[in-house]
Image (cartoon, grey):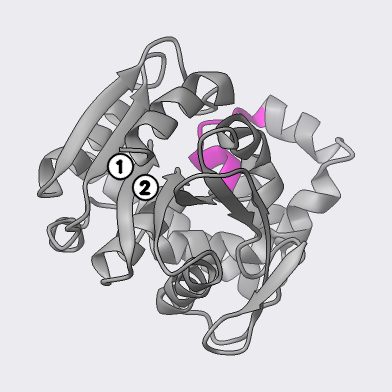
Amino acid sequence: MEHTLSRDGTRIAYERTGQGPAAVLVSGAMSTGATVAPLAAALADRLDVTVYDRRGRGESGDTEPYAVEREVEDLAALIEAVGGEASLYGVSSGGALVLRAAASGLPVRRVAVYEVPYAMDDDAARAGAAYTERLTEALARGRRGEAVELFLRLTGLGEEMIGSARQSPLWAGMESVAPSLAYDDAVMGDHRVPRSVLASVTAPLLSLAGGASADWMRAAARTVAETVPRGTYRTLEGQSHRVEPGVLAPVLAEFFAR
């Protein structure tokens, strides 16, 4: 892994592969750069792709206090490291970070996001607010396992599956990045579509959702596309929130290479 320094001195670990226009891939909650590495491999024949560990996870450092602006500065440092201009792709809450970065005025050529989980009604927004409150309390008390469980419930995972996850060898790794759940929650704001932020995104945008995902996911993706001035929406048939790299890569490569 290579490293770059963010504005506040935090070391950000990244890997770069491929040739072509530069693109940076941003992972979502409970993940590292390794999560989007298969997508990077599928894009490497057409793009110069960078994956990185967001602050507070993997091989990247962390500096308190956290603010969404610090993660935007992380992306600014990465864009500078790969040539001063890049396209951005973000999945789930990573897409929310990408949208905020693009709205901030960074040198972003094109933007693509996949299923940013914005609340589409009052009930969902209230559920998001309740999650924020309980997550904050769990992390303040050092209850990392409880924080992970809260997140898994938010994603719709049942209690039996959460119990099985607790017995999995992967659970320790999930607990290790649990504090970063607060970072993704902050990036999501009040969980509603941040219309004023999206209206400030000037780069062309592609908002994607899976045809096998929940209706509200597709509705959120359409709303993002409709709110960004140069936004386009597309459904990837047969795909869910865990989109297959082989399906997504050709779509992103064609959009970013324009």
- Circle 1 residue: 124
Residue nearest the observer in this picture, 222 or 179: 222
Q: Residues within 10 Å of mark 2 (few under 14, many from 20)?
A: few
Residue nearest the observer in this picture, 194 or 84: 84
Q: Is residue 167 visible?
A: yes
Disc 2 vs disc 1: Cβ atoms closer than 8 Å?
A: yes
Residue nearest the observer in this picture, 170 or 199: 199
Residue 183, position in %: x, y? Answer: 52, 66
- Circle 2 residue: 127
Mark 1 residue element: helix
Q: Residue at x 57, y 59 (%)?
A: 181
Residue 13: say if magenta.
no
Gap in angstroms between the C-alphas marked 2 and 1? 5 Å
Q: Residue reaching furthest front?
A: 20
Q: Which residues are magenta?
A: 151-159
Residue 178, position in %: x, y? Answer: 68, 59
Q: Residue at x 62, y 43 (%)?
A: 18
